[in-house]
Image (tube, rainbow, N blue to C red):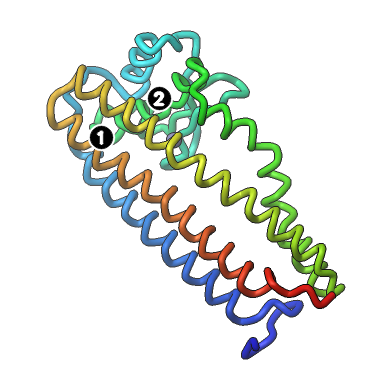
Amino acid sequence: MPLYYGFYGIDLGYYLVALVALVIGAIAQAYIRSTYKKWSKVPANVPGTGADVARRMLAEGGAGEVGITRVGGSLTDHYDPRDNRLHLSDDNYRGASVASVAVACHEAGHAIQAAEGFGLYRLRSALVPAVNIAQQGWVLVLVLGVMLNAFNLVQLAILLFAVSVVFQLVTLPVEIDASRRAVAYLSQNGAGLDEQGARKVLTAAALTYVAAALTSIIQLLYLLGRYGGRGDE
Ligand SMILES: [Zn+2]
């Protein structure tokens, strides 16, 4: 029995779950930012900027045709398969710190996954369109289901949410693999400090994905507990 009904019949418990999720996410974000900042002050031994090192790693990894471009913001780095380019934030594109080369090589790792046809990477890419629909639609479907007291819609909402949880679970090994490739490249081409720092920065980055997956699982369990067993349409 919910203690309090909030917006459109979604009870206070949901807001508490959302709050816990926000706090876990904020802690993970603070950790990556502080780890990144620390290793941004340590010059890498591997020669060149993040863009230079990524370019060499791409060439060695059989993805030499992948472009590299700059993108605004901080820690906005990503590989976009649509234009087949690494988009590196200014700091990492131009920077020659351990943090910059670590992030740039992690993104190069994703491009190499794509070039190789790495299975989990392909599965993750295949899920993207469904996930976009699911992430945009699940709350609306849930609210409609609760308002109309339509159990089928509530079940559909939970299913849509579960799609994004599966996506996040598939994302984790893809991220860890890209980081593993970056650390391996830097340990072969740089000094011990490069490898050590890259491991720290990329582990902190991976924790943001773990936090996101964990909070989604908590949300899913909450939704299942709150709405999952109620067939009284
Ligand atoms: Zn990544």
Image location of residue 142, percent across then percent down: 75, 65
Image location of residue 103, percent across then percent down: 35, 33
Secondary structure type for disc 1 = helix
Quadrant containing ligand 1? top left
Image quarter where the C terminus lies is bottom right
117 relative position to 109: left or right = right
Q: Which residue is mark 2?
A: 109
Circle on res. 198: 1
123 relative position to 136: left or right = left
* Pointer 1 residue Cβ closer than 8 Å to ligand 1: no
* Whole-number angstrom distance, CA of label 2 to CA of label 1: 13 Å
In the depicted view, which residue is nearer to us: 107 or 224?
224
Tally of numbered discs: 2
Image location of residue 6, percent across then percent down: 69, 82
Image quarter where the N terminus lies is bottom right
In this rendering, the answer to whether 146 lies above or below 56 is below
Q: Quadrant of residue 56?
A: top left
* Pointer 2 residue Cβ closer than 8 Å to ligand 1: yes
Lower sequence index among marks 2 and 1? 2
Q: Amino acid at mark 2?
A: Gly
Q: Residue at x 76, y 58 (%)?
A: 156
In the depicted view, which residue is nearer to us: 147 or 72?
147
Q: Amino acid at mark 1?
A: Ala
In the depicted view, which residue is nearer to us: 106 or 166?
166
In this rendering, the answer to whether 93 lies above or below 213 is above
